[in-house]
Amino acid sequence: MKLWLLRHGEAEPKARTDAERNLTENGRMEVQSAAAHLQDQPLQAILVSPYQRAQQTAEIVRQVLGFSGPVETVPWLTPESDPGDAMLYLDRRSEQRLLLVTHQPFVGVLGGWLVNGHRDTPIPMATASLAELEGEYIATGLMRLTALRHPS
């Protein structure tokens, strides 16, 4: 099982609501760079937060990769989501190669929880950071962080 965690690219500082913030031009470039690390990876699905900046990030990844598989918007990938709730949904997935496009603090906490078995040591995730985790299955404390790439 491989799980990639991608934080959205740099977003504008303000919008009418947090959910409506768009990527900046720099954020779009960051995401293109991150997506290049997913080339030749046999992704089966992309799960994405409903927030605008995450949607834009997933679309850039889809375009860069020429990905024609499912891109699903899910409500449990927002900034303040609970990793325990996310695990309930992830346990129901049959794919072995998933990309999650989401936000801080959730993405760092989820990654740390999957690797370390607790929420106290989040993975450091800057905008457009990409973490690659591997394990027999998605389980708390049983995955390995095999790569962590930050935008340059």
Image: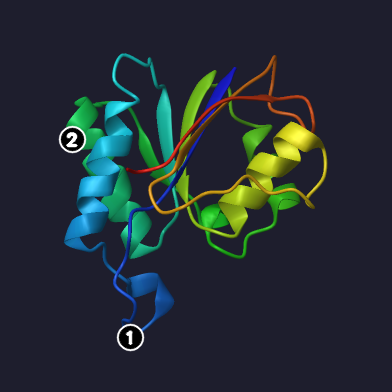
Element carrying mark 2: helix
Q: How many marks?
A: 2
**Residue assigned mark 2:** 63
Give the quarter of the figure containing the C terminus: top left
Quick check: 90 above or below 142? below
**Residue kind at label 1, given as amino acid type:** Arg
Q: Residues within 10 Å of mark 2 (few under 14, many from 20)?
A: few
Disc marking residue 16: 1
- The residue at the point 23 percent across, 40 percent down is 32
Percent coordinates x, y for residue 138 in the rendering: 69, 27
Q: Nearer the viewer, residue 91 or 150?
A: 150
Using the rendered image of the protein, determine whether residue 59 is visible from the camera's viewpoint: no
Q: Residues within 10 Å of mark 1 (few under 14, many from 20)?
A: few
Drawn side of residue 92 relative to residue 70, left or right: right
Drawn side of residue 28 relative to residue 15, left or right: left
Quadrant of residue 99 within the rendered picture: top left
Of pointers 1 and 2, the one earlier in the residue sequence: 1
Quick check: 89 above or below 133? below
- The residue at the point 30 percent across, 49 percent down is 57
Cα distance in 3D space between marks 1 and 2: 28 Å
Drawn side of residue 31 relative to residue 122, left or right: left
Element carrying mark 1: loop
Quick check: 132 above or below 90? above
Percent coordinates x, y for residue 40 in the rendering: 31, 14
- The residue at the point 74 percent across, 42 percent down is 113
- The residue at the point 47 percent across, 51 percent down is 102
**Residue kind at label 2, given as amino acid type:** Gln
Disc marking residue 148: none
Percent coordinates x, y for residue 72 in the rendering: 40, 42
Using the rendered image of the protein, determine whether residue 94 is visible from the camera's viewpoint: yes
Percent coordinates x, y for residue 56 in the rendering: 27, 53
